[in-house]
Image: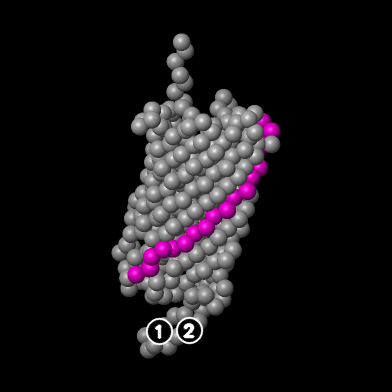
Amino acid sequence: MPRDPLHQNSCLFLIAAAVLPLGAVPAMADENGASLYLLGSGGPGAAVSPPLPGVYLDNIVMVYDASSHASRDLTIGGNVVADVDSTVAANFTTLLWVPSTNVLGGTLTVGGTLPVGAPMIDASAVLTGPRGRQLGVRTHDSALMVGDPIATAMMGWKSGNMHYAVSGMLNVPVGHYRVGRLANIAFHRWAGDVSVAATWLDPKTGWDVSGKVGFTFNGHNEDTDYNSGNDFHAELAAEKKLSSKFSLGAQGYYFQQVSDDTGAGAKLGAYRGRVLAAGGTLAYDTVLGRSPATIRLQVLQEFDAKNRVEGTNFMLSLSLPLHMKMPAKE
């Protein structure tokens, strides 16, 4: 049975929004370990565009639970800490507008995301007093805050069962940022991401195989004098439609920082990060009111982390159209 195209759309932009959750995660390489691109968002349907012009909603609830080794130093909020335990609960609301499905032979989608989150972080820190005396302490920080808004855009094309897409994101550093604190959602720096994706979707068999790769370009945090390095990310996913309502799949990602952190705030030097992850996804297609909707659960377990925390990411998303321009009747 053919898959609801809105299901594809929810995965595709799962998060142009969700990029921000990582802003709250003290993952490390890159300042605070905050990557604009949300690892895990390039899942099933990564290159499938919305089917009709209109306005679409994606809402994601994310819980990320992670920790680092006690022997690994990390820089968070301008502080060098170790033995980090963090839990981030966040909500990301994304509005997408499709003005046309015939731009350069494809579909244009633009949108924006606003994150609200509550990071909770425990870490060991070394404090230096006025006479140079050092004291090791265990510190905790948490807060509820609004992060930086993110602008998104994508061009998508379709040829038979193949879908292709080029997308970009821009982080606008105007969110609530707490200088010198461990818990933050906002990046407090300009950052952009460019990605390309491809999806093979066979409506007859219900199979979806998707891949996505991209680069993130990070700017300068003036408050901490920290220049975060640039990042490479790659994702792969495969999913099977089990019935008219349920889909089940597997996915994974690879993240590698490709240039050094610099500036006075980069107290640990270049400190390039890396992490891999594998997990699964379950989607449920339904109808809310008169609108087709997709509810998706994703669970990804990280491993082989370097200069980052390592954790488990849970994401629950809801995607549905708010308004679609239906084709004129002949």
Q: As drawn, which residue projects farthest toward the front?
A: 160
> Between disc 1 and disc 2, whose residue precedes?
1
On-image quarter of the N terminus: top right
Horizontal and vertical percent position of residue 285: 62, 34
Spatial distance from mark 1 to mark 2, Cα to Cα? 8 Å
Q: Residue 9: which numbered mark, if any?
A: none
The percent coordinates of residue 196 (x first, y second) are 43, 46
Contact check, label 1 and label 2, Cβ < 8 Å: yes
Image colouring: one colour
Q: Which residues are magenta?
A: 243-262
- Can see residue 276? yes
- Residue 283 vertical placement versus 330 (above, below): below
Q: Is residue 269 magenta?
A: no
- The residue at the point 59 percent across, 34 percent down is 202
Q: What residue sits 41% from the left and 83% below the top?
A: 128
Query: Badge 2, how many Cα within 10 Å: few under 14, some, many 20+?
Result: few
Disc ID at residue 135: 2
**Furthest residue in direction left, as rendered:** 222
Q: Amino acid at mark 1?
A: Gly
Residue most extreme to the right: 243
Q: Secondary structure at mark 1?
A: loop
Q: In the rendering, at what x and y percent does residue 7 appear?
A: 56, 36
Q: How many marks?
A: 2
Instruction: Decide which of 260, 121 is in the foreground and name it.
Output: 260
In this rendering, does residue 20 appear at all? no
What amino acid type should be assigned to the residue bearing mark 2? Leu
The residue that mark 1 highlights is 129
* Side of 233 relative to 85 (left or right): left
Q: Residues within 10 Å of mark 1 (few under 14, many from 20)?
A: few
